[in-house]
């Protein structure tokens, strides 16, 4: 009897355990319902980036963005799909939306937990946002604080109903609407024109968006935009050289004016930038905003000059200087003192001077650069070359056309043809001598003279043979008195047997 009671208790225990487990299963979340399929809008495959969403009882329950034109989601097991999920009753109607516009109840679908469904969506109306563009602002807004800009609608052209713009700095922007009715938007030609109300000077950005007949508005990231600067302020002169009322100004001076902003170079001419009674040329530096008047000849000593900038001078935004600007200065008095040579390089009687050296002479004052030449006024005996002059350091430099010879005495001379800025010549010819360094020796095969024989010397010998370079001592590698193909072979042998 006891055995029978135990056998009867077993089913009761199992039933009790199942009853205890029921609440746990009741709390399990609803399985989602996944969708994928084709997506057609107004007869064409939907563009990449189109957003498809699902709602149940006006609550969004899923969303997907297309990555392939005309397709949302994919049929593959691992493809992304539009997953509808939430506390949704089986059989509840799922509504679909494309770019926030309803597809229509024809395409509603009953929710089925755990199902994967191919559900092709067709949208008859246009859901594609229009695209607009801004052409260059006209006229240039830097010329006017009420700039005009024009543009075109690029997409869904004939369906554009309105265009709006906003303009401002930073985060300040206000949309201003214009339609075909007020003439700002020319629908047949798909173009628009806006004149922005008067703006203060500064930098601005204008944005444009459009709305089509299907109420699609340009996406924020695709708003057409352009930046511009409003400038109505007159430029000013911030400094001059020489300064106002300067005295003892060298007769070799150039006259400069620096402005407060970038100027229109074409307005700075010998007619708008003048130095009374003096002919010259005018230039402008965009980097420093500086205009320079360079006299054609030295100014007259002990004379007061007046420089003038007329109101024809304008900035890059065509704003003229507020009023004619003038300033005066006086050149140095009579100068009858001859210039002297204050230093030379190499110094007189120098020895062991590198054969690649230049020869320089520094004077006691500003010199007339035109009198320092290689044709009789600055020479080095037996050497040809070129001469330059540094007006800041008063230094003339003779640059030999080729290296000087080793172990050789050279004599440099400055003649009385050289004069200072006032026209005073050197009191007498100035000469000095120096001796070049000893010859370090010639290494056979070292055609380029770098102290070693290598593949570079083969190239050098080839160039000498071809007549492209002058002959060098080391190029005669076999020392037979001439440079030819045999020397290339010898260089190769030297390289192979160092």
Image (cartoon, grey):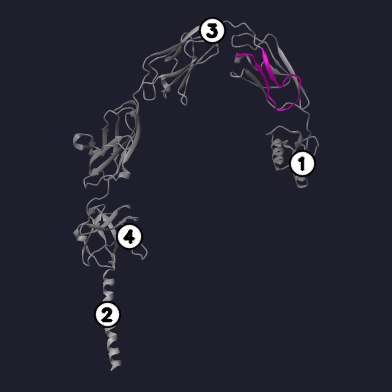
Q: Nearer the viewer, mark 1 or mark 3?
A: 3
Q: CA distance from mark 1 to mark 3?
A: 67 Å
179 or 263, nearer to the observer: 263
Where does the magenta region start and end? 340-367
- Residue topped by disc 4: 73
**Chain-order first, disc 4 or disc 1:** 4
Q: Which mark is residue 16?
A: 2
Q: Report which residue position mark 3 lands on.
A: 300
* Residue 42 position (above or below residue 427): below
Quick check: marks 2 and 3 in contact, CB under 8 Å? Answer: no
Can residue 425 be seen here? The reply is yes
Q: Does the residue at mark 2 contact the one at mark 4 (Cβ under 8 Å)?
A: no
Q: Secondary structure at mark 1?
A: helix
Task: Rate crowding at label 3 as few (under 14), some (14 to 19) or many (20 or more) other CA atoms within 10 Å.
Answer: some
Element class at badge 3? loop
**From the viewer's perspective, is the residue at label 1 or at label 2 nearer?**
2
- Mark sitting earlier along the chain (1/2): 2
Circle 1/circle 3 CB separation < 8 Å: no
Residue position marked by numbered label 1 in the rendering: 486
């Amino acid at each position: 009897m006891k055995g029978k009671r135990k056998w009867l208790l077993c089913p009761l225990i199992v039933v009790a355990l199942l009853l205890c487990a029921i609440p746990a299963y009741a709390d399990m979340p609803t399985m989602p319902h996944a969708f994928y399929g084709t997506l057609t809008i107004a007869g064409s495959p939907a563009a990449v980036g189109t957003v498809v969403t699902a709602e149940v009882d006006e609550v969004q329950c899923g969303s997907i963005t297309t990555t392939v034109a005309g397709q949302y989601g994919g049929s593959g097991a691992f493809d992304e799909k539009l997953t509808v999920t939430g506390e949704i009753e089986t059989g509840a109607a799922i509504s679909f939306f494309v770019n926030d516009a309803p597809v229509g109840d024809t395409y509603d679908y009953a929710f089925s937990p755990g199902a994967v469904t191919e559900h092709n969506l067709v949208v008859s109306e246009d859901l594609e946002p229009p695209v607009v563009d801004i052409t260059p602002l006209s006229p240039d807004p830097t010329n006017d604080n009420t700039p005009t800009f024009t543009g075109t609608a690029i997409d869904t052209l004939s369906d554009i109903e309105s265009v709006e713009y906003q303009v401002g700095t930073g985060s300040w922007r206000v949309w201003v609407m214009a339609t075909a009715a007020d003439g700002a938007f020319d629908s047949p030609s798909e173009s628009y024109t806006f004149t922005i109300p008067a703006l203060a000077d500064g930098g601005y950005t204008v944005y444009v968006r459009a709305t089509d007949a299907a109420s699609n508005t340009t996406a924020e990231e695709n708003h057409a935009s352009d930046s511009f600067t409003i400038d109505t302020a007159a430029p000013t002169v911030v400094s001059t050289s020489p300064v106002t009322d300067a005295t003892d100004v060298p007769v070799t001076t150039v006259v400069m004016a620096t402005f407060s902003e970038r100027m229109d170079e074409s307005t700075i001419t010998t007619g708008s930038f003048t130095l009374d009674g003096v002919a010259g040329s005018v230039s402008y530096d965009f980097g420093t905003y500086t205009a320079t008047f360079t006299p054609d000849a030295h100014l007259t000593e002990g004379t007061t000059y007046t420089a003038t900038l007329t109101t024809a001078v304008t900035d890059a935004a065509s704003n003229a200087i507020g009023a004619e600007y003038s300033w005066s200065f006086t050149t140095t008095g009579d100068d009858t003192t001859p210039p002297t040579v204050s230093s030379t390089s190499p110094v007189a009687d120098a020895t062991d001077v590198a054969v690649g050296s230049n020869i320089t002479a520094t004077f006691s004052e500003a010199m007339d650069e035109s009198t320092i030449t290689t044709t009789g006024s600055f020479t080095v005996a037996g050497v040809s070359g070129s001469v330059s002059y540094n007006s800041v350091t008063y230094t003339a430099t003779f640059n030999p056309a080729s290296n000087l010879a080793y172990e050789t005495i050279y004599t440099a001379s400055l003649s009385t043809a050289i004069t200072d800025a006032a026209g005073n010549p050197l009191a007498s010819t100035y000469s000095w001598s120096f001796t070049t360094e000893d010859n370090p020796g010639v290494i056979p095969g070292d055609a380029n003279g770098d102290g070693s024989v290598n593949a570079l010397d083969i190239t050098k010998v080839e160039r000498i043979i071809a007549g492209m370079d002058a002959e060098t001592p080391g190029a005669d590698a076999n020392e037979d008195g001439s440079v030819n193909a045999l020397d290339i072979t010898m260089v190769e042998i030297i390289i192979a047997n160092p």
